[in-house]
Amino acid sequence: MTTATLCPPTTELHGSWLESWAEWGSADQDGASVFFAAKFGWDLHSPQGFAQWVELLNELGRPGAVPPEGFAPQSTLWLERDGEYLGAVSLRHTLMNEFLQEVGGHIGYGVRPSARGQGLAKLALAGALDEARGMGLQRVLVTCNDSNIASARTIEACGGKLERIVPAAEIAQRFGAVEDLRRYWIAV
Ligand SMILES: CC(C)(COP(=O)(O)OP(=O)(O)OC[C@H]1O[C@@H](n2cnc3c(N)ncnc32)[C@H](O)[C@@H]1OP(=O)(O)O)[C@@H](O)C(=O)NCCC(=O)NCCS
């Protein structure tokens, strides 16, 4: 087995991506930005819909890209090994709205259920930090639910310093939070 690597989104991984999606079931695929496909009505099962989505994900990472109204420009990277899609990480270039400033942060990531526990989230987050450094960001906000131990350990392993744990009640009304939220900053 070769080492997993980070690559730009590509239509070559369509079949494997669909297998991963099925593994996630009804859970949101953190870091994957499937919501863009939903927004534009693209069917990710079809080669055409998947290609449109992949093109948008790559476009949004280019300097000067203009994202759809209400969305931040972002870079997306996929985890891949031997032609298998393993997960995704996305780096929002700016904290352009209150949701990102208070809840979402700069970076989101997710690893397909069958590939967890192999250090892939740490690889993905480290890759996003490299990307942030390349863009001239000096620090990034990364958040996770207080109960998400694997995510908290990922952030801490990548240098995250806990700013505070925000009680769910503080952000429930505006953002629908049901869990306390850990806010970390990572110097890049
Ligand atoms: C959180 C998630 C990304 C972790 O991915 P992963 O590839 O399994 O994580 P890694 O193997 O890189 O491990 C990262 C750290 O978490 C720890 N960890 C992994 N799984 C764990 C578990 N089930 N319980 C406790 N710790 C765990 C690892 O030991 C490691 O910590 P260490 O460096 O201190 O040993 C993955 O579980 C996932 O996709 N969850 C659903 C989506 C999600 O929660 N995304 C993050 C949103 S903030």
Image: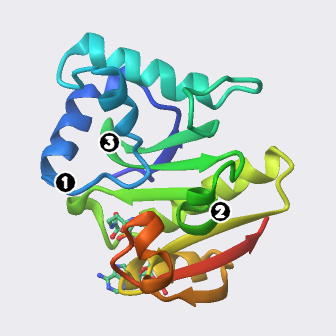
Q: Quadrant of the C terminus?
A: bottom right
The amino acid pointed to by label 3 is Tyr
Q: Position of residue 102 (x, y in %)?
A: 60, 68
Q: Which residue is mark 3?
A: 85
The amino acid pointed to by label 1 is Trp
Q: In this rendering, which labeled residue sits more in front, label 2 or label 3?
A: 2
Query: Would you say 146 lies left or right of 48 here?
Result: right
In the figure, 129 relative to 84: above or below?
below
Ligand 1 has an atom within 8 Å of the beta carbon of the residue at disc 3 = no
Mark 1 burial class by Cα count in 10 Å: few <14, some 14-19, many 20+: some
Q: Position of residue 139 (x, y in %)?
A: 79, 65
Secondary structure at badge 1 equals helix
Query: Would you say 28 lies left or right of 92 here?
Result: left
In the figure, 103 relative to 92: above or below?
below
Q: Which residue is mark 1?
A: 24
Q: In this rendering, which labeled residue sits more in front, label 1 or label 3?
A: 1
Q: Which residue is mark 2?
A: 101
**Is residue 169 or residue 12 the one in the foreground?**
169
Label 2, label 3: how far apart the Cα atoms are: 30 Å
Residue found 50% across the figure and 29% down from its top: 57
Secondary structure at badge 3 equals strand
